[in-house]
């Protein structure tokens, strides 16, 4: 997810476009499923950032049937998203949007053809207003759900890099926090164990929960994966949250009336449990995605470019960067 440019070889398969498509103007209204009751956490100090997302592709030879996809921010309880500007060259036929698994939004760019030496560009500017999250004051009534909703049950299963069925992870999950008084404290005991026993070490590759446990080290992705895996092994729904250059976990608890809430925590970095002092935009929530055109489940939905036919490898540079807001909007 850290690569910004690459060369695309000859590919004879075009990305399937059979997911839900929405018009660009409606992206500010799109939001993942949220609780119908007031959140337990407080959303404070909203802050707006402007982000540009898209790509530029240059064709040394002739190319046709080009499809590029890039993950863009979508609205969540803690953030709202608005399209500010769309920039595209005449080669770009259309820019559309689709949602994958309810938790990832992609821009889908269609380019019918490029002649040798031509360059196509598609960039979209977004204003993302995100609030910091403050942990709830009262947590004693929050419980691990005995029968979570169908949309939450998927966060109890193993997923790529989150080996919650691994015997060592299962055993460890039974040992951590058994003496704690309530379910919030049990989740916090798992959190503290990961932070105290897994040394932070940056790694370019995604190695997963089992690798982090075996090596005793990992970066934000491995710490997040191990926390999520231990929670799931315990019967506590949890998932990964992806933001530019970072990720962190969320866990799910219900109150006595059966209302459910997601709570974030900072697995790597300054300690923050049930809270999130973060303003970078949420790009994805979850870690087991079925991406059109890819047979295996994906832990992270990557930016991609494919073409039906090319005579020379395409050169593509993806962009996802924060820019300054207009001082006089």
Image (cartoon, helix red, strand yellow):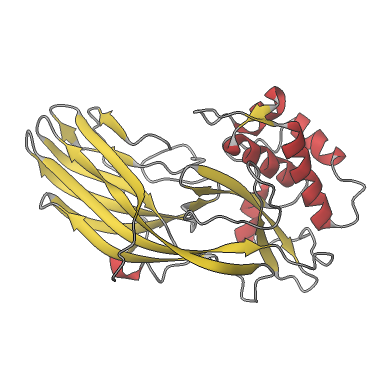
Q: Residue at x 76, y 32 (%)?
A: 197
Q: Quadrant of residue 115?
A: top left
187 horizontally vs 228: left or right: right
The quadrant of the picture occupied by the N terminus is top left
Q: Residue furthest bottom?
A: 37
Identity of the residue drawn at 86% across and 38% down = 175
Q: Position of residue 278 (x, y in %)?
A: 55, 55
Residue 277 position by quadrant: bottom right
Q: Residue at x 11, y 49 (%)?
A: 91
Measured along the vertical axis of the image, is residue 27 above or below residue 68?
Answer: below
Residue 23 makes an appearance in the image: no
Residue 257: x %, y % from top left: 77, 74
Q: Where residue 25 sits: x, y (%)?
A: 30, 70
Number of labels in the image equals 0
The C terminus lies in which quarter of the figure? bottom left
Farthest-out residue, top? 215
Nearer to the camera, 64 or 185: 185
Q: Position of residue 36 (x, y in %)?
A: 61, 75
The answer to whether residue 204 is left or right of residue 117 is: right
Residue 253 appears in the figure: yes
State the residue in front, 150 or 78: 78
Q: Is 4 displayed left or right of 211 in the figure? A: left
């Amino acid at each position: 997810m850290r690569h910004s440019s690459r060369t695309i070889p000859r590919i004879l398969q075009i990305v399937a476009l059979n997911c839900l498509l929405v018009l660009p103007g409606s992206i500010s209204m799109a939001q993942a499923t949220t609780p119908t009751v007031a959140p337990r956490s407080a959303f404070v100090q909203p802050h707006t950032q402007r982000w540009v997302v898209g790509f530029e592709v240059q064709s040394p030879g002739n190319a046709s049937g080009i499809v590029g996809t890039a993950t863009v921010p979508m609205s969540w309880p803690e953030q709202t998203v608005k399209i500010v500007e769309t920039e595209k060259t005449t080669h770009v036929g259309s820019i559309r949007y689709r949602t994958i698994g309810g938790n990832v939004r992609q821009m889908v760019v269609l380019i019918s053809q490029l002649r040798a030496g031509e360059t196509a560009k598609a960039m979209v500017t977004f204003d993302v207003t995100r609030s910091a999250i403050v942990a709830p004051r009262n947590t004693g009534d929050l419980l691990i759900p005995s029968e979570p909703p169908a949309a939450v049950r998927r966060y109890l299963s193993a997923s790529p890099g989150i080996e919650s069925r691994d015997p060592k992870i299962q055993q460890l999950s039974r040992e951590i926090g058994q003496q704690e008084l309530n379910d919030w404290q049990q989740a916090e005991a798992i959190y503290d164990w990961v932070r105290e026993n897994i040394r932070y070490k940056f790694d370019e590759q995604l190695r997963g929960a089992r690798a982090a446990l075996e090596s005793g080290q990992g970066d934000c992705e491995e710490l997040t994966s191990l926390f999520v895996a231990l929670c799931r092994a315990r019967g506590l729904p949890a998932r990964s949250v992806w933001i530019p250059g970072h990720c962190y976990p969320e866990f799910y608890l219900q109150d006595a009336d059966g209302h459910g809430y997601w709570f974030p925590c900072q697995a790597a970095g300054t300690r923050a449990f049930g809270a999130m002092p973060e303003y970078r935009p949420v790009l994805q929530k979850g870690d087991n995605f079925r991406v059109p055109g890819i047979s295996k489940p994906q832990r992270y939905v990557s930016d991609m470019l494919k073409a039906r036919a090319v005579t020379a490898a395409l050169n593509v540079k993806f962009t996802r960067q924060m820019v300054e807001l207009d001082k006089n909007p």
